Amino acid sequence: MRIGDAMRTAVRDFYEQSWRFVVLNSLLSVAVLSLLVAASYTRSALALALLLGPLAAALMHCAVRVVHEEELSLRCAVEGLRLQWRRGLELSLIAILVFLAGTIAIRSYAGAGSFGWPLAFLVAYVLALFVVFQVQLWPIAIDERERPLREVLRKSGFALARRPLSSIVLAFFLLLVNALGAAAAVLPLLTLTVAYSFLAAARFALPDDPILEAGS
C-alpha cells in the first residue's frame, strides 16, 4: 500500500477500534515509563528493555489482525502476547544489540579526531537505515511468526530494497507524528501515536490481499 493510503487507512482503523488501541497504547507506555523510572535509579534496569519486545509484538499482532480481518478485541492482545512473545524478544534483542554497537562505534570514532568523523557519520547513517528497516521488519515478522527469523530478515530487506524512498518517508512521518504527540503535552504519545504508527506500518508493509499474495 502507498504511504498516503496506509496513513489514511490507519486513521480509519484507529477510529473504528479507538478505545481498544488507546488501552493497548497506554499499557505499553506505562511499561516504557516504568522502565525509564527504574533506569533513573540504576542503569542495570535498562536490561529490562528486552521485555518491552513481547509487549510491542502483542500490539503489532493486533495491528496485523486489523489489517487482515478489520476487527479487534482485547483478547487479541493476550493472544498476541502468548503467540508472539518469543518473536518480540528476538526483535528487541536485535534492536538493542544494533543500537548498543552503533552508539559505542559513534563515540569511539567521534573521539578519534577529525579522521574518525566520517566513520561516525557512516555509522549514524546505518543506524538511521536500521530504524527505517523496522517499518518493514516488525509487521512481516509478526505476520509470519512461523517463518524462521533469518528468512523474515531477508524478506524484510528485500521489501525495503524494493521501496527504499517510500519506507524512509513513512518512517520520517511516523517519527514526526510521535514527536508531535510528545510535544503536545505527552498524552497523545502515551495513548494514541504509537498504536497509530503500528497500524500505519502494518498497512504499508503487508499485502492488501494476503490470500492472493500467498498464492503468488
Image (cartoon, rainbow, N blue to C red):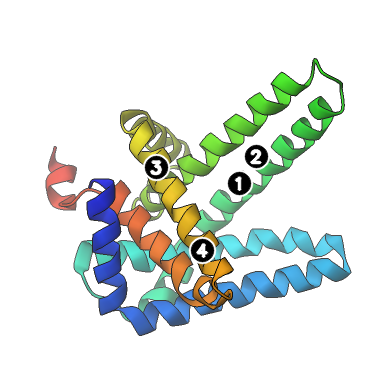
- Work out whether residue 99 can be spotted: yes
Asked if labels 2 and 1 touch by Cβ distance under 8 angstroms, the answer is yes
Mark nearest the camera among 4 and 3 is 4
Image coords of residue 58 (percent x, y) = 45, 67
Query: For the point 67% across and 42% down, which residue is it?
Result: 99
Q: Amino acid at mark 4?
A: Leu
Locate residue 30 relative to residue 100 in the image: left or right. Answer: left
Q: CA distance from mark 4 to mark 3?
A: 16 Å
Asked if labels 2 and 3 touch by Cβ distance under 8 angstroms, the answer is no
Q: CA distance from mark 1 to mark 3?
A: 20 Å
Instruction: Name the secondary structure under disc 2.
Output: helix
The residue singled out by tag 4 in the image is 180
- Earlier-in-chain disc, 4 versus 3: 3
The residue singled out by tag 2 in the image is 98
Locate residue 138 relative to residue 143 in the image: left or right. Answer: right
The residue singled out by tag 3 in the image is 169
Q: Is residue 42 above or below residue 146?
A: below
Q: Amino acid at mark 1?
A: Ala
- Earlier-in-chain disc, 1 versus 3: 1
- Earlier-in-chain disc, 1 versus 4: 1
Tell me where residue 19 sits by quadrant.
bottom left
- Earlier-in-chain disc, 2 versus 4: 2
Asked if labels 3 and 1 touch by Cβ distance under 8 angstroms, the answer is no
Q: Nearer the viewer, residue 18 or 50?
A: 18
The residue singled out by tag 1 in the image is 95
- Earlier-in-chain disc, 3 versus 2: 2
Asked if labels 4 and 2 touch by Cβ distance under 8 angstroms, the answer is no
